[in-house]
Image (cartoon, rainbow, N blue to C red):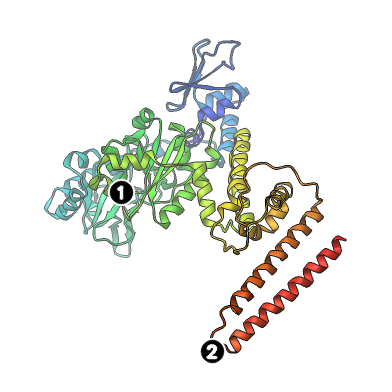
């Protein structure tokens, strides 16, 4: 039977959660590290159907059915292999490849690729401990790396000269360039990585498929990565994931930091579940890979603007993967530091405190909205509400989505429309309002939210508490608004008269046109306000 290219079926398994696919047909409950439900392939009342997300297979202890995401789709839908692949590709949002068997040449190319990258890694490792690599070795040791760490992560050094081009003269040029290690210029082949501290990038199987080179002279960009190749796709590769998989399983979470050095230092200092994207460009594919291991993720970014933007991007990317059992949090390292510096200067306990105090996703999203939109204005609140609605619409679990929307609605009412909390708005100093008037105003605000929105600034200026329930007003909407406007005018007139009295009681010796013009302006405003009030009162008759 013909087969799809293994890389495509691997990508399907990588992009899609086995639990998500099976739970469309079988209600599953998590017990321990596995999910359990009643087998869809035979009748049973006691669940014996087990799903292991991490290993990517299901097994029924009742009837013996066993398989992966593809075989489950085939058996449960009663369709053939090709149709199962098509259905899964639609779920993953992937374009179907050509239906063909991997050729012997493709297999050979992949094997040659891995041989080249493995050999290059060994060369870089040797050069790090040579005379030519002393400055790179000093740099990495100053960053807190000992020989054991350097060996484990196979860190090396790429010199300024074309070492790979010269040492691989026994390899065909196209084979060498296909790995991204060498490029062809006007004067022949040259090394892509030069004068870089080299971090090998491993795939999920522990094979080296690419490299990340860090600058040693402070030049930007700090890191350059192998460009996408047949076996390496930056959007689908997570640095340190091959080392972190077991720890993610044990810790029941993963931690995502920004850089390779941060990830390694976290792993060796008690946070083995830490990984990093290749650069700050976290992708949906990265989230999908992590969610297959665990949906509990703590994102740890720098506290600067770039880190905040990266966190917001991570938040919106994760929303389609969010479940009611997910624990997603955001931690920030402030003061221009990063996890590497915190661990070096303050130790593991300080870093653990940052991680433990991380903000839950819902709270982080709410805080971000309040920081980035002018929620003290109607227009700003409208924009913020549209953004929140767009975010919650990405949550695929409709029941959970509804719960989150209700949570945000409650927060909007309590924080955006609780006037007493908005102390930043300038208030007018006037005598206290009698209790009867206060209760009527509270009743109007709770009965007619549209008036509360329309006259926000005025209600804030009253400096009264709107907490507690009151009986709904019997006034109609029109009558209630007339009361609010008339009361507002009366207080404004009172304020103007007090201001005029203050001016008249403190006449300066050199009073001139400015003083007289100010009094004249106040008198004119009093006349206008009284005319409006009289007109409004006449309408009430």
Disc sitting over residue 172 in the figure = 1
Q: Is residue 486 above or below residue 282?
A: below
Q: Residues within 10 Å of mark 2 (few under 14, many from 20)?
A: few
**Does residue 239 appear anywhere in the picture?**
no
Which residue is at a point 54% across and 32% down the rendered structure image? 324
Residue that extends furthest to the right in the rendered view of this protein: 541
Secondary structure of the residue carrying numbered label 1: loop
Tell which circle, 1 or 2, labels the residue nearer the N-terminal end: 1
Instruction: From the viewer's perspective, tell me whether residue 127 is left or right of residue 462.
Output: left
Name the front one of labels 1 and 2: 2
- Which quadrant holds residue 376? bottom right
Q: Front-most of 175 and 124? A: 124
**Residue linked to disc 2:** 510
Q: Position of residue 124 (x, y in %)?
A: 21, 48
Query: At numbered mark 2, what does the secondary structure look like: helix, strand or loop?
Result: loop
> How many other residues sit within 10 Å of disc 1, few (<14), some (14-19) or many (≥20)?
few
- Give x and y (percent) for residue 516: 63, 86
> Disc 1 to disc 2, how far (Cα)?
96 Å
Q: Nearer the viewer, residue 85 or 414?
A: 414
In the image, farthest residue toward the front: 505
Residue 70 position (above or below residue 287): above
Which residue is farthest left? 131
At x 73% / y 42%, what residue is drawn?
Answer: 471
Image position of 135 (left or right of 104): left
Q: Quadrant of the C terminus?
A: bottom right
| Residue at the image point whose x is 63% and y is 76% from the top | 500
Give left or right: position of 382 versus 539. Answer: left
Look at the image and tell me whether residue 219 can be seen: yes
Q: Position of residue 62 (x, y in %)?
A: 52, 10
């Amino acid at each position: 039977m013909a087969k799809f290219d293994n890389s495509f079926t691997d990508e399907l398994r990588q992009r899609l959660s086995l639990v998500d696919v099976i739970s469309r047909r079988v209600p599953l409950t998590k017990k321990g590290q596995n999910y359990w439900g009643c087998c869809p392939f035979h009748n049973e009342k006691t669940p014996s159907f087990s799903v292991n997300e991490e290993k990517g297979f299901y097994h029924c202890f009742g009837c013996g059915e066993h398989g992966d995401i593809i075989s489950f789709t085939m058996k449960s839908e009663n369709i053939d292999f090709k149709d199962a692949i098509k259905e899964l590709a639609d779920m993953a949002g992937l374009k179907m490849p050509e239906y063909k068997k991997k050729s012997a040449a493709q297999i050979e190319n992949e094997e040659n690729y891995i041989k080249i990258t493995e050999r290059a890694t060994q060369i870089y490792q040797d050069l790090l401990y040579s005379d030519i690599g002393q400055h790179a070795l000093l740099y990495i040791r100053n960053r807190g790396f000992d020989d054991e760490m350097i060996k484990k992560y196979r860190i090396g050094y790429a010199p300024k000269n074309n070492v790979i081009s010269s040492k691989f003269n026994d390899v065909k040029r196209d084979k060498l360039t296909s790995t991204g290690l060498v490029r062809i210029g006007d004067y022949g082949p040259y090394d892509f990585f030069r004068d870089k501290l080299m971090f090998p990038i491993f795939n999920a199987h522990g094979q080296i498929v690419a490299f990340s080179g860090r600058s040693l002279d402070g030049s930007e960009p700090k890191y350059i990565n192998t460009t996408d190749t047949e076996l390496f796709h930056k959007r689908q590769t997570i640095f340190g994931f091959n080392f972190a998989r077991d720890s993610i399983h044990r810790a029941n979470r993963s931690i995502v930091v920004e850089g390779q050095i941060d990830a390694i230092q976290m792993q060796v200092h008690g946070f083995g579940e830490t990984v990093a994207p290749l650069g700050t460009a976290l992708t949906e594919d990265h989230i999908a890979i992590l969610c297959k291991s665990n949906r509990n993720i703590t994102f740890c970014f720098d506290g600067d603007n770039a880190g905040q933007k990266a966190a917001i991007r991570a938040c919106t990317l994760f929303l389609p993967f969010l479940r009611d059992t997910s624990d997603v949090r955001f931690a920030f390292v402030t003061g221009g530091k990063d996890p590497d510096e915190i661990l070096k200067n303050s130790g593991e306990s300080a870093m653990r405190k940052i991680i433990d105090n991380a903000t839950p996703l819902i709270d982080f999203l709410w805080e971000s909205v309040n920081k980035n939109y002018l929620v003290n204005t109607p227009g700003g609140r409208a924009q913020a509400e549209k953004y929140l609605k767009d975010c919650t619409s990405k949550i695929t679990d409709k029941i959970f989505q509804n719960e989150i929307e209700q949570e945000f609605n409650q927060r909007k009412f309590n924080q955006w429309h609780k006037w007493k909390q908005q102390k930043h708005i300038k208030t007018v100093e006037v005598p206290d309002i009698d209790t009867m008037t206060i209760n009527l105003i509270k009743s109007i605000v709770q009965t007619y939210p549209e008036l509360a929105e329309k006259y926000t600034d005025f209600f804030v200026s009253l400096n009264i508490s709107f907490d507690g329930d009151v009986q709904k007003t019997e006034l109609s909407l029109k009558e209630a608004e007339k009361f609010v406007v008339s009361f507002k005018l009366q207080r404004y007139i009172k304020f103007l008269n007090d201001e005029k009295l203050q001016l008249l009681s403190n006449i300066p010796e050199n009073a001139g046109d400015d003083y007289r013009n100010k009094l004249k302006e106040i008198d004119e405003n009093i006349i206008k306000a009284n005319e409006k009030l009289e007109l409004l009162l006449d309408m009430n008759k």
